[in-house]
Amino acid sequence: MKNLAIFTAVTAIAATSVLHAEAIPASAAGVWTQSSSGKELVLVPRIKLQPNVGVSYGTSLGGTAGYGSPTRTTIVTEPASMQVARSMTLEIGKDGRFTWKIAKRHAEKEGCSMTTTQVKHGRISQEGGKTIFAVENGTESFESSCGRQGGSKLAQTSEQYDVQIGGGRMVLQSGATRWTFLRG
């Protein structure tokens, strides 16, 4: 009996969410493209000298004075502001399904560049004046001009934007992020 009550409550919440979601405007359907270049935060590896407190399992790269040294050298990943060339293609179906391809290119180190590509698949809906991109699956890959490469699957997530469509343009805005797409 308790399980039936929980099932009924969950079903009611799901039905309410579906009823409040609005259909996307027909003008959003189609292929949209965006291209830009500017400063963005990029995660980069850095070599840091850190205090050696207790026993640590950090990567030792030398440069410390051995056992009992007051410091250790580690590799950390942190955001850095870099010049990034970005290009995006957003394909939106009349049923609200989308495929969003994002390619970013930036310097990796002297003489090398890094290209990161994300491909997101999901469904668009509108709720409370916001457009929600529910990412159901996708991939992210990277390739360095110096030979490194790799990839992984994207987790399910959702992204929320204010969207304005008109004059062959679609503007997506969320906080400080503002992208202008042109109909492709």
Image: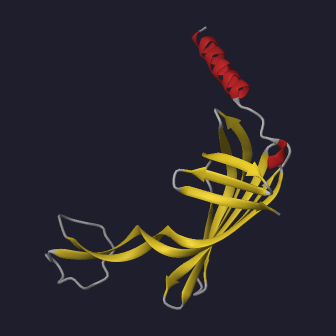
Foreground: 75 or 61? 75
Assign the N terminus to one quadrant of the image: top right
The structure residue drawn at horizontal position 62% and vertical position 67%, both measured from the top left corner, is 151
x, y (%) of residue 17?
67, 27
Q: Residue at x 23, y 75 (%)?
A: 72
Tell me which colouring the rendered structure shows.
Answer: secondary structure
User: In the depicted view, which residue is nearer to us: 172 or 74?
Assistant: 172
Q: Nearer the viewer, residue 130 or 10?
A: 130
**From what the image shows, is residue 27 above or below residue 149?**
above
User: Which quadrant of the view contains residue 26?
Assistant: top right
Quarter of the image for the C terminus: give it.
bottom right
Residue furthest out toward the front: 167
Residue furthest toward the bottom?
Answer: 111
Is residue 57 left or right of 130 when viewed as pictured? left
129 left or right, relative to 165: left
Q: Nearer the viewer, residue 169 or 120?
A: 169
Q: Is residue 167 above or below residue 4?
A: below
Q: Position of residue 19 (x, y in %)?
A: 73, 24
Q: Is residue 149 visible?
A: no
Q: Residue at x 66, y 34 (%)?
A: 127
On the image, the x and y values in percent for residue 110 come to: 49, 90
Task: Give coordinates of residue 71: x percent, y percent.
Answer: 19, 75
Compared with 146, 18 (above or below) is above
